[in-house]
Each structure stands twice: as C-alpha cells, then as structure tokens.
C-alpha cells in the first residue's frame, strides 16, 4: 500500500487555510481518503476525542443517540 499526504491552500470567506488529505492507494488502483487535516488539525483525531468523551459518559448507546440527534438537527435546518 502507498500512503500519501496531499496538501493545498483553500480560500474561504476571504481567508486562506492549509488543507491536507491523507490517502491510501487501494489494490484496485483507486485512492481512499482516510483523514483530512485543516490547519494541521486532524479530523479523525478530533472526532475520536469527541466520541471517546461521549463513550466514557454513556457508552455506545449515548454515542449513537448523539449522532442521531445531530443528524436530525442538520436535517431540520436543511428542509
């Protein structure tokens, strides 16, 4: 397997941000993005920390409920 990190600057609301994509080449030849870093902050690490805190407090059921509640909130704002 080949792992690479591809970085670029992205403009958003008049600001430039460093965005890097961590990718792994699959056996089929395609690429799988497995992490995104924004200004050096890993989304995987960020979510892992958030999920761990919820799991510690309420277990898997609390994590699933939190995710479902967030999806419901997002859906209600887009309709």
Image (spheres, grey):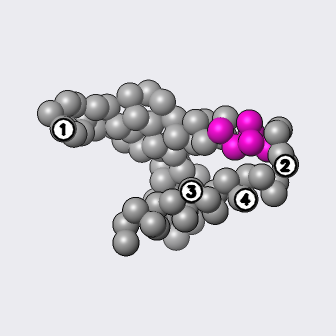
| Span highlighted in magenta in the image | 50-55
Mark 2 burial class by Cα count in 10 Å: few <14, some 14-19, many 20+? few
C-alpha gap between disc 4 and disc 3: 10 Å
The residue under label 4 is: 64
Residue behind mark 3: 70
Front residue of 75/46: it is 75
* 53 falls in the magenta region: yes
Residue 13 is labelled as 1
Per the model, the C-alpha gap separating discs 2 and 3 is 17 Å
Q: Disc 2 vs disc 3: which is toward the camera?
A: 3
Q: Main secondary structure of the magenta part?
A: helix
Q: Quadrant of residue 19?
A: top left
The residue that appears at 82% across and 39% down in the rendered structure is 57
Magenta stretch containing residue 48, yes or no? no
How many other residues sit within 10 Å of disc 4, few (<14), some (14-19) or many (≥20)?
some
* Horizontal arrangement in the rendering, residue 68 relative to residue 62 (left or right): left
Q: Which quadrant of the figure contains the C terminus?
A: bottom left
* Disc 4 secondary structure class: helix
> Viewed as shown, does residue 12 lie left or right of 76?
left
Residue identified by numbered label 2:
59
Name the residue located 55 percent from the left edge and 62 percent from the top edge.
71
Marks 2 and 4, the one that precedes in the sequence = 2
Of labels 1 and 2, earlier in sequence is: 1
Relative side of 39 to 47, left or right: left
Q: Is residue 62 above or below residue 15?
A: below
Provide residue 39's location: percent of width, then percent of height.
38, 28
- x, y percentage for residue 4? 46, 43
Q: Secondary structure at mark 3?
A: helix
Where disc 1 sits, the SS reads loop
Number of on-image labels: 4
């Amino acid at each position: 397997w080949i792992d690479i990190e591809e970085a670029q600057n992205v403009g958003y609301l008049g600001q430039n941000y460093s965005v890097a994509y961590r990718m792994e080449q699959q056996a089929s030849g395609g690429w799988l993005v497995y992490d995104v870093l924004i200004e050096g902050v890993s989304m995987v690490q960020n979510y892992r920390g958030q999920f761990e805190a919820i799991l510690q407090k309420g277990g898997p059921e609390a994590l699933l409920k939190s995710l479902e509640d967030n999806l419901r909130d997002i859906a209600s704002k887009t309709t």
